[in-house]
Amino acid sequence: GRRAEVAARMWRARPGTFAEALQGGLRVTQFNVERILKAFMPDAIPESFAELKIPLKVTATDFFGHKLAVLSGGDLHSALAASAAIPAVFRPVMRDGRLLIDGGIYNPVPFDLIEHDADIIIAVDVVGAPTKSGRKYPTSVDLMFGATQLMMQSIIAAKLRQCQPDILVRPAVSKYRVLDFMKIDALMAETAD
């Protein structure tokens, strides 16, 4: 079923050589997000921004530049990979001489970037928040991701005080974790309203 397909795609996304696995230093827990996206991305997604029918802005965080990186030209796949490069889970993406990580770190719901480009702005906040589980104390991983969610929600709240999208959608995603892509059908069904 679906788990077997995911396992097969993850296997194909693994480093081809030992040297490639050690590229940039030993990273036991960091996966190459570019390889993983290549394994999972539908063939219909073009390789460059120029091939898109609707203009798109993808956000990433310029780690050493200490700022938001807005990507709207060139290689689309590397831009999507950079935007999804969750620290400590996925290896950062090098693009145009910049080390890029997850765009949500700097701007979790970047509705403000299209303020002058759209008649109606619909923002979707899928950051969520920490939720209680059956444990007395959260695990270290739960604490790390939960703290990140709280920081992102703080950024969103500050942005909303400055400007508002026309529509803000906040689906109930808090019970899902950042890597729960195997549960996409359940998530979509539960948040359809």
Image (cartoon, helix red, strand yellow):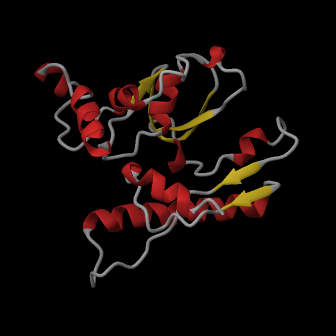
In the rendering, at what x and y percent does residue 184 appear?
46, 51
Residue farthest to the right? Answer: 119
Which residue, as the protein is rendered here, is positioned at the far front?
A: 1
Residue 45 appears left or right of 182:
right
Seen in the picture, residue 105 relative to 140 is either above or below; the reply is: above
Quadrant where the N terminus lies?
Answer: top left
What residue do we see at 28% from left, 45% from top?
3
Q: Is residue 174 visible?
A: yes
Q: Where is residue 12 in the image (x, y as percent from the top left)?
A: 24, 26
Q: In this view, does 101 lie above or below 75?
A: below
Q: In the image, is residue 167 above or below residue 61?
A: below
In the depicted view, which residue is nearer to us: 81 or 133? 133
Q: Where is residue 64 in the image (x, y as percent from the top left)?
A: 45, 36
Residue at 60% in and 34% down: 58
Left or right: residue 58 versus residue 114 is left
Look at the picture and state if 37 lies above or below 120. above
Q: In this view, does 184 lie to the left or right of 171?
A: left
- Asked whether residue 24 appears in the rendered view, the answer is no
Where in the figure is residue 99, as x and y percent of width and height? 42, 31
- Count of numbered marks: 0
Foreground pick, 70 / 131: 131
Location of residue 144 by image quarter: bottom left
- Residue plotted at (48% across, 21% down): 43
In front here: 115 or 16?
Answer: 16
Q: Quadrant of the C terminus?
A: bottom right
